[in-house]
Image (spheres, rainbow, N blue to C red):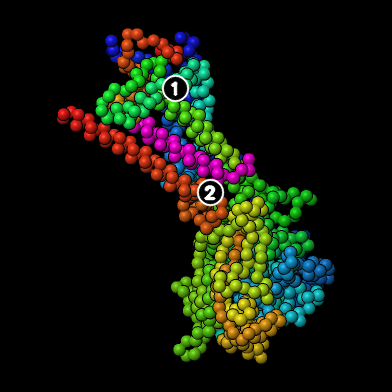
Amino acid sequence: MRSRKKFAGFLIGVGSLLLGLGLVSVVPSSAAAPLVIPVQGVAQGGTADHSQFEILQGPFATGPEVTAACLTCHTRAAQHIMQTTHWTWEQKVNDQLLGKNNVVNNFCIALSSNEPRCTSCHIGYGYKDKTFDFTKETNVDCLVCHDTTGTYKKFPAGAGHPVYEAREFPVGSGKMWNPPDLALVAQNVGKTSRATCGACHFSGGGGDAVKHGDLDTSLINPDRQFDIHMAADGLNFTCATCHNAVDHNIAGGRYVMQAKDTHGVDILGRDDQNRASCESCHGLTPHRTDAKLNEHVARVACETCHIPALARGDQPTKMWWDWSEAGKMNTEGAPFKIKDAEGYDIYDTQKGEFAWERNVVPEYVWFNGEIDHMVIGRQIDPTHPVVINALKGSADDDKARIWPVKAFRARQPYDPNTNLLIIPNLFPNSPEDKEAYWRSYDWIAAASTGMASVNQPFSGEVAFVESVMYWPQTHMVAPKEQALACEACHSTNGRLAALTDFYMPGRLQHEGLNTFGTVLVGVVLLGVIGHGAARLILRKNNKKS
Amino acid sequence: MKYTKRTFIYPIFERFWHWSQAALIITLGLTGFEIHGTYRLVGFGNAVSIHNTAAILLLVLVAFTIFWHFATGQWKQYVPTTQKLGAVIRYYAIGIFKHEPHPVRRTRYTKLNPLQKLVYLGFKLLIFPIMATTGLLYMFSNTLGIPISPIAFLHVLGAFLLISFFVTHLYIVLTTGRTPLTHLKPMITGWEALEEDDHAAPQAAPEPSAD
Ligand code: HEM
């Protein structure tokens, strides 16, 4: 008897000890090592003071003259640039020839026949039409990336040149563009900055915040809440901290993306020398205390939880563009604009109707890094929205992860007889260009010259089709306190409701089983209630009788 | 002749086991169905942490309990028998309404009636192993690289069966005694007033130890 008693006591003792240990382990450990944040200064400095170089004393009449001076020391720099997509606007991916020269989008649609306007974001001087000399070294624009004064700006309609005498743009707006002091700019060159990269990349789609959803001028001087990496009061990263350059070739890009970096932390001499992925710094098990979160990394892109919304900054991003509404005139028969309360265009005779939004919940897609782009000349199926860039991947594809995207929707012109998306000539390339839509407001004329410029047929008829373009989100990473909580996805009608091709706890899947279980428990409950009620009633009857 | 006698029936380990298992299973059920998406209670993340912890504790508890059953011979309580099984089923289906006496008398040697033996054995050999196996596979599904959809299906199915058992168990325990406490109290104190004959003879299981 005694020994049995001791034995029972022992079991209870061990049991409660384990219970206690178990409970302790539920309490999250808060004793993580403090994070050391290396504070970087503004990316400047270097060992050469360019203001002391005689060849940079000027005066310079044009940009190419400055480039000629740069090349006297940096003799291979132009050759480097010429290898990059910043210069070629062309990139062969699998069998598709992509790049700005060859793709169609659903913003201003395509480059061809609109060059002087679009090429104000080319890294060269003078790309005003197809005759541009891609081999001439002095056509490379060094200053647009290496200016540190903030005074050098390419003129919006200058085919890549700044203005050399004061000009107004947009014409009639009263906004004057003054020529930069090229010698001053040349003497103050330095590393690229958020502002220099942003000069083009924050204005994709023709204006601040229009295109990407995760890139706009709020990133020039962001705070920690807005961008944990670029925060001027924090890590103060520039774009090039992650988008590192090797021989002027910048890591990262949107035609092929690394949807899943399996390298982990980049080690010099061993890895792909591409730091433009979260894993390049954070590794493959980035969460220090939660193994479950690390397991998510295999199927969920970091961005999905850590970029909780699109356009988290000051600017709203464009979400909708209806070209079919363009061309209306006001009562005086003149083109006009309508602005919303904040001053953003919601109607423009030249472009149609827009919708802007900030803090938008992204859409989510499986994405393995491969993109099928709409290229000039590919037929569409006008009975469905045209997918401009189909992001490939599915739950069954091991290379794919769930990514947040901005889905940009539009209605854009197509030829209902050939089922080709129309490349319209929008921008008047010269005083003689009477067909351009922004002068003629005539889709037929604009389509004729535009399609001719890419050697595509045009039947003479224009219709409009809905389209969608996906922008995987990678920037504006929020501090970890703002990362999505589990319920954002693990709930009925959560953020991943549209992704139904896999099982995920929290969203009441296995419907048949749920029905069966509910009925089973219901029947059992009713059964015991009925049983009990019958007993009560029969007992009363018994007593009475 | 018959008389009731205060009898020591549940040794302390058995009571500890019963109540901690009950607490853990209720916790697992509540958090489990939150994980499933049936309702929101403590938040998905918390539900997962609590569920995982409770599951591990339950496994440890059960490991000890299995050991206890064999070390004390109490496992024999669960050896199924068909003797009087029909009578017990008939009792719950008909006799209970007519105020007939329960056909099987509890003694400290046979704590479980034949129907209970069968149901509890089913719980131990079927439902619990399903829950533990699918639960562990669920827990390590990423490491093992196995799909969770079928695992979750079986785990949730088991959970529904378990709830059905739980409801029936509560109904019988709380309503078939003279008062709701009649059957509850012994599981707390260990002592129960049992009907005994003069000539009650020791049967399958050995006498439980008194404290
Ligand atoms: C030793 C036993 C058990 C183990 C090891 C276990 C383990 C697990 C695990 C790992 C999960 C998935 C959590 C996640 O999403 O990460 C889970 C879910 C769940 N558990 Fe358990 N569990 C056990 C017992 C139970 C019991 C006793 C019940 C019910 C009474 C239960 C009900 C559920 C339910 C309903 C889910 C949600 C499944 C889904 O919707 O996918 N579990 N369990």
Circle 2: residue type: Met
| Quarter of the image where the C terminus of chain A is located | top left
Q: Residue at x 69, y 81 (%)?
A: A456
SS majority, magenta: helix
Give the vertical position of A6 relative to A83 (above or below): above
Dot 1 lies on which element? loop
Name the chain letter of the residue that bears numbered label 2.
Answer: A
Left or right position of B154 against A49 = left
Question: Label 1 to label 2, Cα distance in Å?
Answer: 43 Å
Q: Residues within 10 Å of mark 1 (few under 14, many from 20)?
A: few
Q: Residue at x 37, y 42 (%)?
A: A522
Instruction: Name the residue tied to disc 1.
Output: B81
Is B1 or A314 nearer to us in this picture? B1
Residue A517 - label: none
Give, as a single range, the part of the protein colored magenta: B144-171
Give the image location of residue A95, x and y in percent: 74, 66
Quadrant of res A387: bottom right
Circle 1: residue type: Thr
Instruction: Name the residue tied to disc 2.
Output: A504
Give the image location of residue B200, x and y in percent: 36, 10
